[in-house]
Image (spheres, rainbow, N blue to C red):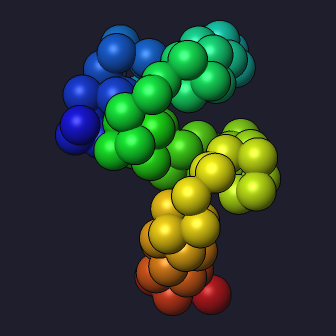
């Protein structure tokens, strides 16, 4: 699942900067619903990652039953934090 595909599906564009701020909450809500219904681990992780980047992700212990998935999410969080401008 590519990030561009997720952006297109939930926000109608592949560029997050083009999303109308008023449309953002509706797209995030649809993603949260789909996240709750998704059973494929890879798809769930992709959805959770985008939700995390939008500051809307559920907590790790709620989002992932598998400790390996939680560890992968923590690693991703650390990588994003390391890339954030100061």
Q: Which residue lies furthest to the front in this view?
A: 66
Residue at position x 50%, y 79% from top?
75
**Looking at the image, is 53 positioned above or below residue 34?**
below
**Looking at the image, is 39 positioned above or below residue 27?**
below
Image-based side of 73 in relation to 32, left or right: left
Comparing 56 with 13, the one in front is 56
Residue at position x 50%, y 69% from top?
68
Comparing 42 with 52, the one in front is 42
Please provide percent x and percent y for residue 83: 46, 82
| Quarter in which the N terminus is drawn | top left
Which quadrant of the structure image shows residue 36?
top right
Question: Could you tell me how many numbered marks the image carries?
Answer: 0
Please provide percent x and percent y for residue 30: 59, 13
Comparing 7 with 75, the one in front is 75
Please provide percent x and percent y for residue 35: 56, 27
Comparing 62 with 83, the one in front is 62
| Quarter in which the C terminus is drawn | bottom right
Please provide percent x and percent y for residue 81: 57, 80
Residue at position x 55%, y 82% from top?
78
Image-based side of 25 in relation to 14, left or right: right
Q: Kindly tell me whether residue 15 is visible in this rendering.
A: no
Image-based side of 75 in relation to 13, left or right: right
Q: Kindly tell me whether residue 7 is visible in this rendering.
A: yes
**Looking at the image, is 44 positioned above or below residue 37?**
below
């Amino acid at each position: 699942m590519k990030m561009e595909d997720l952006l297109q599906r939930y926000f109608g564009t592949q560029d997050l900067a083009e999303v109308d701020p008023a449309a953002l909450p509706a797209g995030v809500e649809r993603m949260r619903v789909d996240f709750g219904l998704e059973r494929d681990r890879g798809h769930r992780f992709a959805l959770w990652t985008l939700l995390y980047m939008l500051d809307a992700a559920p907590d790790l212990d709620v989002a992932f039953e598998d400790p390996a998935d939680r560890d992968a999410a923590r690693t991703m969080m650390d990588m994003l934090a390391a890339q954030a401008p100061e």
